[in-house]
Amino acid sequence: MRIAYTADLHLEFLTSNLQKKFAREFLVQDLAGMFCVQLDKTACDFAVVAGDTSHCVADVARFFSEVDKSVSKPIYVVLGNHDYWNWQSSLVRNYEELPNKNVGDIETWFRDKFSQFKNIKLLIAGDKYYYEDLKIIGDCGFSAYNNRFNFRQGIYRATINNAIQEKELTDRWRNFYKRETFTDEKTLIITHHPPTDWGQTYEPDYDERFYIFGHVHDIDERVSSGVEITKTGNYYGDAANGYSKSGIEFKVVVLY
C-alpha cells in the first residue's frame, strides 16, 4: 500500500512565490495543474492532503474542484487551522458569499462542496472510509492540548472564540478516534495537527495504526506541545510545503 502525502500548500504564499520566481500571474487552475502533474509522477494507490490548503474557504473549494477534474486516484483531505480562517480570497476577485466565521457553518459549507467531487473525500470527525482493507479516518485535530498553538495565538482567526469551544472540538475528534481505532483493523489516521496537539503524548507504536499529519513546517525543528516530533514508527509528519516553496511536493509512505 503506497500513499502519497502532502500538507500546508498555503496557496496564497505558493502563488506569491511562483509569481516572483517566474514573473507572471498564476491562477488557482495553474496550482491545481501543478498538483496533478506531481501526483501523476508519484507511484501511489491514493493521496493524502493534511490541511492548510488556503485561508479562504472558497479557494480551497476552487482548488480541489479543479484537481477533481483531472485525477483518477482517490484523495483524502482534512482541514487545517488556516482552512478555518475564512478570509476573502487574495488569489481571485471573490464576490461569492462566504459562510459565517464559526466551525459549524464552515464545516457544513465544506461538506456540501466536497460532496460534489468524484475522487476527493473530506474527513471530519465522524467520517470513515475504506480503501481495500485499510480504514481511513481524520479531522483537523484541534490543538486544545497545545498551549503554544491554539486559539489564544489567533490560530483559528476568530472561528473559535474561547478555550472551552476549542477543547470541545478537540475532544470531539479524540473521542471518535478512541472509539474507532482501538481494534485490530489497519487504520490510517490523518490530522492536520500532530497527535501531541490533540492527544498530549504519542502513544506506543501500534502495528495496525499509521499517522499522517501536517502543520509543523520545519522538519528540522518539529516541536509541538514541548515534544520533539520525529519520523519514527508509524508517524509521518515531514511533508509540509510551507511558506517558502515555489512548487508542490509529495512524499510516499509504504504501509504494507
Image (spheres, grey):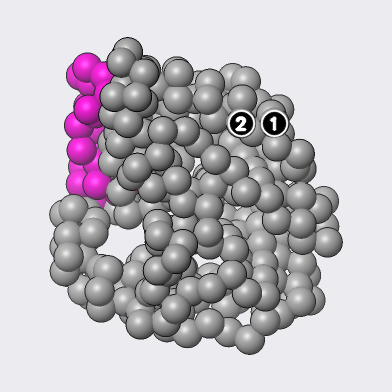
Q: Position of residue 161 (x, y in %)?
A: 16, 63
165 is higher (above) or lower (below) than 227:
above
Residue 100 painted magenta: yes
Image side of residue 29 versus residue 133, left or right: left
Question: Please, what is the three-letter code of the amino acid marked with disc 1?
Answer: Lys
Please give the name of the residue rendered at 57% of the width and 55% of the height, measured from the top-left corner.
Answer: 127
Q: Nearer the viewer, residue 94 or 221?
A: 221
- Specify start and end residues of the magenta stretch as a single range: 83-102
- Residue that badge 2 annotates: 38
- Residue that badge 1 annotates: 41
Question: Please, what is the three-letter code of the amino acid marked with disc 2?
Answer: Gln
Majority secondary structure of magenta residues: loop
Q: Position of residue 139 (x, y in %)?
A: 48, 58
Please give the name of the residue rendered at 46% of the width and 62% of the height, measured from the top-left corner.
Answer: 219
Q: Quadrant of residue 21?
A: top left
Residue 96 visible (yes or no): no
Considering the image in quadrants, where does the C terminus appear? bottom right
Q: Position of residue 193 (x, y in %)?
A: 42, 64
